[in-house]
Image (cartoon, grey):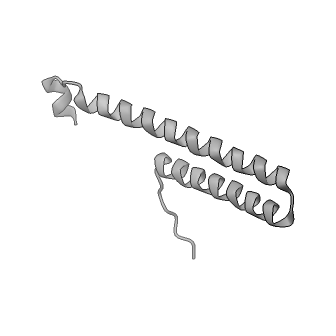
Amino acid sequence: MVVPVLITNCHVSTVMLGWAVTFLIIIALVAAVLGFGGIAGVAMEAAKIVFFVAIMLFAIAALVGWCEAARPRSRSEAVQK
């Protein structure tokens, strides 16, 4: 029996990013073991790019969240939350 699970978009994107990096690293390792140096290098570079893009997106999201938390709220906005 399959039980449906509600997952937020943030969790899904984090899981997908993790799978993408893992897949690229595994491709790089397999290619390196088999002697395909060029393919291994390309896969590792792609994994690095995905990793640094994720770091940049995290930094932007953290900055936006910090700015939203620091913004003074009016009394009517505070009551709505």
Quadrant of the rendered image containing residue 19: bottom right
Q: How many marks?
A: 0
Q: Position of residue 70 (x, y in %)?
A: 23, 29
Quadrant of the rendered image containing residue 36: bottom right
Placement of 73 over or under 20, stated as above or below: above
Placement of 24 over or under 72, stated as above or below: below
The answer to whether residue 21 is left or right of residue 64 is right
Q: Residue at x 38, y 37 (%)?
A: 62
Where the C terminus falls, by quadrant? Answer: top left
The answer to whether residue 45 is left or right of residue 7 is right
Q: Residue at x 75, y 57 (%)?
A: 28
Q: Position of residue 66 (x, y in %)?
A: 30, 33
Where the N terminus falls, by quadrant? Answer: bottom right
Placement of 68 over or under 5, stated as above or below: above
The answer to whether residue 30 is left or right of residue 9 is right
The answer to whether residue 61 is left or right of residue 48 is left
46 or 1: nearer the viewer: 46
Placement of 26 over or under 14, stated as above or below: below
Q: Position of residue 38 (x, y in %)?
A: 84, 50
* The furthest residue to the left: 75
Quadrant of the rendered image containing residue 53: top right
72 or 40: nearer the viewer: 40
81 or 27: nearer the viewer: 27
Q: Residue at x 70, y 45 (%)?
A: 45
Q: Position of residue 16 (x, y in %)?
A: 59, 52
15 or 21: nearer the viewer: 21
